Amino acid sequence: MNGRLFGSSGVRGLANVEVTPSLAAEIGAAVATCSEALKVVVGRDTRTSGAMLENATVAGLLSCGANAWQVGIVPTPTLAFLTKQLKADAGIMITASHNPPQYNGLKIFNADGMAYDMKSQDKIEETIRKRQFKRTNWADVGTSQRVDETSLYAEAVRRKVKLHRKWHVVVDPGCGATYNLAPQILKSLGCKVTTLNAQADGFFPARSPEPNAESLEPLAKVVENLGADIGIAYDGDGDRAAFIDERGNFADFDRTLAAYAGHVAKQKTGATVVTNVEASMNIEKMVEQNHGKVVRTKVGDVYISEEMKKHKAVFGGEPCGAWIHPQLHYCPDGILTSALLLRALENEDTELSDFVAQAPVYSTVRKNMACRNTEKNRIMKQVSESLRSAFPEHREISDVDGVRLVLENGWMLVRASGTEPLMRLTVEGESLRTANKIMAKATLLVRKLVEE
C-alpha cells in the first residue's frame, strides 16, 4: 500500500490487492514485536477474505513468539472486550467494518481493549517499513488455539442492562458479524426478536454492510408491517447500530445521537459527552439544556475514546451510529448501544419516534472544492485567519480537525481531504437559507485561497 498504512479506523483496502496475506503477516509480526506480546486475541467478521487474512496474521504473530487465541467470527466490540477480559497483550480484528465486501482490513487493540493510538500505529508502520521484526528461533515460535469466549461478552451486557418491557424488535445483522450474538443477547434481555439476514455471508447479498436509510428500506417495511416496536441494524463488524422507529421511519443519525446524549446528561448533572467536529450542533442543544458539556475531537472512534478517557466522559459517539459506552469498554458497540437505547426509551416511557423528535432539526450542506495536494497545507494555514476576518461575529473557532467556526445561527468546517485532491466544506444552519448563506460566503473565501 502506498503512503500511510493506518487510516482513521485501522488498516483498510481492497482484499488481496492492497490488504494482502503478506501485509497481514507483517502487521501480525509487527504487533508481536512492538508490544512484546505473549498473547494476542484474533477475530474476524464474515468477509470471504477473512479466513485468509486471519491465518496470515496468526502466522506473523507466531513467527515472533506470540501465542494467538482465535475467537472466530465476532463483532469488533466483542473482540475488544475479550482482549482485556482474557488479559491479552493485544487484539487484532480482521474487518473492513461498513465497507463493501471486496474490502478488508485490520484493526489493532491494546491490552485495555482500546484501539491503537497514533503513536502505537506509527511504531507498527516504522517496524514494517524497516522490516525490524523480532523473529524467534524455530523452537520458540508461538502456538495458536481456537476458543469460544463470546459468552463472557454476552453476560457482561446482560449485567449492565435490565429491560422490563417486552419489546418486539426486528434485528437485521446484514449477514455480518452480529448475525448470531445480537439476536441471542436481545432475546436474553426479554425481547421478542424477529430476524432478517441473520446468517453469516461475506458477500453481503441482502444489503450493503453500511446501515443507512437506503439500505434499510426492507427492514423499515418489515417493522411497519409487523407493527414491531423498533428495527435495529448493524454494520459488517457490529460497531455501528442504526434504528427504524415504530412507524417504519429511519431514525436520523444526528438526532438519535443528540437525543441519547441529552438523556445521558439528564442522568448525571455536569456530565461530559464527546463527539466529532462533523456532528450536528443539536448535540450541544440537547446536552447543555441538561447541564452537561460537549467536547469535540477529530473524526474517528480512536480520537473519541481518547478524549472520553481524558475528560472522564459518560458517553461518546459519532453520527454514523458508532457509540461508545465507557461503563463496559471504550470501543464503539452496536449491540450494547441497542440495549441501552431500549433502556433509555423505558426510562423516559416513550417510543423511538418521540424520543428522537426531542432533538431539533437543522439543515446541512456540503461542498467539495478541487485543490492540489501540494497546496493543502498552505491553504489550511491561511484559512483560519481568513474565516475569522470574514465572520467577525463568530463565537468559537477550533483547529482540532480542519478549521471549525461556530456562529450564532450555525457552524462551518473546512477540512483538507486525506485521500483526494479536495477541500471539503461542511455547513450547518438553523435553516436551509441560513446554511446556504454561510456556505456561499465560505466558498468564495476558500476558492480565493485555492486560486492564489
Image: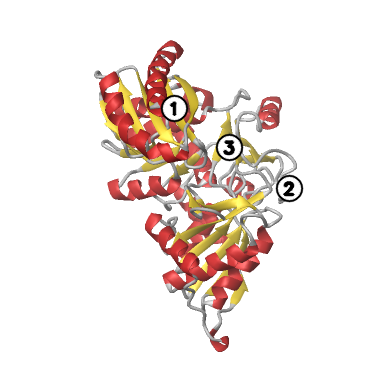
Q: Amino acid at mark 2?
A: Phe
The numbered mark, 3 or 1, whose residue comes first in the sequence reads 3
Q: Residues within 10 Å of mark 3 (few under 14, many from 20)?
A: few
Q: Quadrant of residue 50?
A: bottom right
Location of residue 205 in the rendering, given as x and y in whole percent from the top left corner:
75, 42
Amino acid residing under circle 3: Lys
Give SS at disc 1: strand
Q: Position of residue 269 (x, y in %)?
A: 27, 36
Q: Position of residue 445 (x, y in %)?
A: 37, 21
Q: Which residue lies at the image location 59% right of the left edge and 63% below the top edge?
A: 23
* Pick the front one: 241 or 389: 389
- Residue hosting label 1: 425
The image's colouring method is secondary structure
Furthest residue in direction top, as rendered: 433
Which residue is at the far bottom?
Answer: 139
- Proximity of marks 3 and 1: CB atoms separated by less than 8 Å: no
Q: Are marks 2 and 3 in contact (CB under 8 Å)?
A: no
Label 2 vs label 1, nearer the camera? 1
Q: Is residue 56 left or right of residue 115?
A: right
In the rendered image, is residue 277 in sight? yes
Instruction: Check disc 3 and report the residue beneath it.
Output: 166
What x and y, as percent, mark residue 248?
A: 63, 25
Residue 108 in the figure: left or right of residue 268: right
Question: Marks 2/3: CA distance?
Answer: 33 Å
Q: Is residue 359 visible?
A: no
Among the two numbered marks 2 and 3 on one chain, the one whose residue lies closer to the N terminus: 3
Secondary structure of residue under mark 2: loop
Residue 193: quarter of image: top right
Check whether the beta carbons of the residues at disc 2 and disc 1 lie within 8 A of each other: no
Q: Quadrant of the C terminus?
A: top left
Residue picked out by circle 2: 203
The vertical placement of 363 against 38, above or below, is above
